[in-house]
Amino acid sequence: MPNTYVLISSNVLTTAAASITFSAIPSTYTDLVVRWTGRGTTSGNYTITFNGTGGTSYSHIRMTGSGSAAASGQASSTSFIQYVLSLEDTSYTANTFDSNEIYVPGYATSNDKPTGGTGTQENNAALSYMNVTAGLFRSASAITSLTIGAQSGNMVADSSFYLYGIKNS
Amino acid sequence: MPAGATYEPIATQTLSTSAASITFSSIAATYTDLRIILVAKGDSASAPMIQFNGDTSTNYSGTFVAGSGSAASSTNTGANDSRIRSGYTSVAGLSSTIPHMYTFDIFSYAGSTFKTVLTSFSEDNNGSGYVGRGVGLWRNTSAITSILVGAGGANFLTGATFTLYGIKNA
């Protein structure tokens, strides 16, 4: 039986950075998973893009819980998939990092690429967020690179990113 | 992820013609948990669902949270549903033009207790759609040996992919 959940690449920040990119992703898997934990210099959102593509190729729907209420929002024809309020910043409890995952099925196909993911904050304080996000990348191109960025500011040192490939046979 | 094969593909199917359902059968009891990844379009907006061991009776139930892009809500199937639904029957659904992703995580499928399932639906249509999570229950103590994955009243279109993974805890 093949090993189907394989670490393709990892990136642990040693200095703050606005984004990280996994490039030269081989097409030998069926699906991709990125799991990461991070913290930012500015409160806000993560952005996810593929193949360096901007323009209007993305959209997302998200549902967010704050600990006291749930809400939902969406954006269409955007230049990135947005993980809203998933990025903890320096106002959060020291040493707490957010945890996130995005699943990208069929990343090497010629179909539009749906994605699904979860972002969580928890910092032993009254206000933290968790969200689930459905994203869409409208492109017939195989995904060969994936960028995760802070929409504002930087991601701090020790933010850690892991890209896995999953095979279905 | 360790090098040991703890996350293994059991079977995969890609539709060459549209179909209302597919079935994974002869599932061995050698794993701890199961996971299904489904990427599909459909000929109408219904929520994909699963049934175990050919059981079409009212031995299932589910509870869901969903975001529509403008509001978040929660509902449940009530007692005695006939399937484990991926999401709301009233809102979630397949698209005929944009592929959606669904997951079903089935815990302790070979055990002798009732079976719990976590579901997810990712249905962004670039301006509409839904996202959410659910929990399902099958009130049966039998080991799961087959799983029907259905389009919930619609048909999956050609190209839909279904993959069943087994996860071992040791």
Image: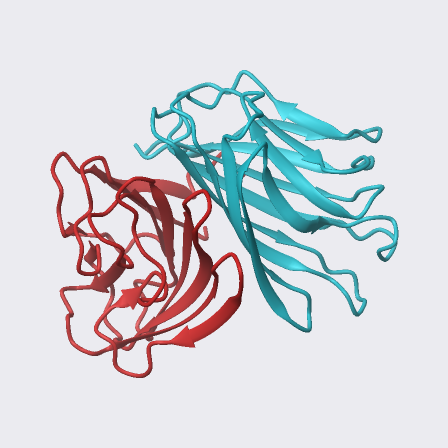
Residue at 42%, 21% (x, y): give it.
Answer: A142
Is residue A38 or residue B155 the one in the foreground? Answer: B155
Q: In which quarter of the view is residue B120 placed? A: bottom left
The location of residue B22, given as percent across then percent down, is 16, 49
Task: Please provide percent x and percent y for residue A97.
Answer: 76, 49
In the drawing, does residue A46 fall left or right of residue A158? Answer: left
Between A105 and B35, the one nearer to me in the picture: A105
Instruction: Judge left or right: residue B18 versus residue B141.
Output: left
Kindly indicate which chain is depicted in cyan in the rendered structure: A
Q: How many marks?
A: 0
Q: Is residue A131 above or below residue A65?
A: above
Q: Is residue A54 above or below residue B107?
A: above
The red one among the chains is B
> Is A9 in front, or is B3?
A9
The residue nearer to you, when weighing A124 against A112, is A112
Coordinates of residue B92 in the picture (x, y in percent): 36, 59
The relative height of residue B81 versus residue B134 in the rendered view (above or below) is: below
Q: Specify the quadrant that holds the N terminus of chain B.
A: top right
Q: Find the residue positioned furthest to the top.
A: A24
Residue shown at 70% from the left, 45% from the top: A45
* Residue that appears at 36% across and 69% down: B136
